[in-house]
Amino acid sequence: MKNCFKVVHNIFSKYTFIFIIALSLSIYAYFKVKIVYAKYDKMQNLKKINGINVAKMLLNNCGLFNVPVEIAGGNLTDKYDLKNNTIKLTNSVYNSDSVTAMGIAAHQVGHAIQHSKGYSYLKIRDIIAYSSSIISNISLFIIILSWIFNLTILNNIGIIIFGVVVFIQLLTIHVEFDASKRALGAYIDTFSLEESEISKIKDVLYASALNYASTMVISIGMLMYVIGGRLTKIMMRVLR
């Protein structure tokens, strides 16, 4: 019996360890993005063109003449509005000629390219992404209730719903990295750049995609932790 409880303890410990690793990776991703943005935000791009002109030049070179570029409020809330086929850049990107502004503007153009190519994952992501935070909160609320009232069925429902959230976030990451990849290709085709500047743009582009990874990684860690707790309870019941 002692060995059996040791097995249960090992199961829970492993999933707890996975959660700690996920939390560490999430923190790393978060600070990596901040460091990259801050580093290149102080560095003027070699073309000396601001974010609005970067976006327009890339769009024109890709034949996307019907995609407006607008200025928007907020900080790091730059986005491609799929519904209105519009790129919205914050003031710090719209009017800046930093390498960071170039990369962020290019990333949003990457989404416009996805749309023009009929990239199905972008449309799917757009449909479900807005509800992911609500679903996440609901799933966590259900899981907490299941712990309070010791209701297995609620715990199972919460895990399933939270699994859906993780799937949405995985889809988002795939879409974001694909947008950065397309943006880099468009960038190289549009501008004559030195290898050093291409390397800097790559850093910013993939930091733009990595920006979403911190949330996804911690969600995976939380899911593993909850599943570990569920498996532990099952094993405890079997051993009684």
Image (spheres, helix red, strand yellow):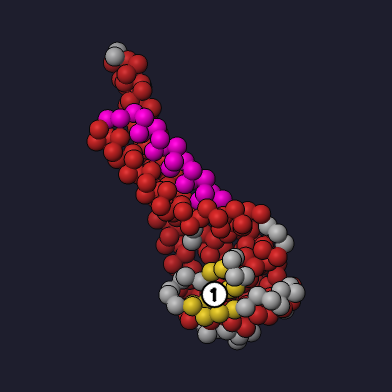
Numbered range of the magenta stretch: 150-171
Residue 159 drawn in magenta: yes
Residue 123, horizontal then vertical, whole percent: 61, 57
The answer, for residue 63, to whether it is visible in the render is yes
Residue 175 drawn in magenta: no
Residue 181, horizontal then vertical, whole percent: 65, 62
The residue that disc 1 covers is 88
Q: Residues within 10 Å of mark 1 (few under 14, many from 20)?
A: many
The answer, for residue 14, to whether it is visible in the render is no
Please identify the quadrant where the N terminus is shown: top left
* Residue in the image at 65% along x and 68% along y: 112
Quarter of the rendering containing residue 147: top left
- As helix, strand or loop, the secondary structure at mark 1 comes to strand
Residue 84, horizontal then vertical, whole percent: 59, 70
Q: Is residue 79 left or right of residue 219?
A: right
Image vertical order of residue 92 relative to residue 76, above or below: below
* Residue in the image at 36% along x and 30% along y: 153
Residue 13, horizontal then vertical, whole percent: 35, 33
Image vertical order of residue 29 relative to residue 15, above or below: below
Three-letter amino acid code of the residue under disc 1: Lys
* Residue in the image at 28% along x and 38% along y: 145
Please identify the quadrant where the C terminus is shown: top left
Closest to the observer: 23 or 57?
57
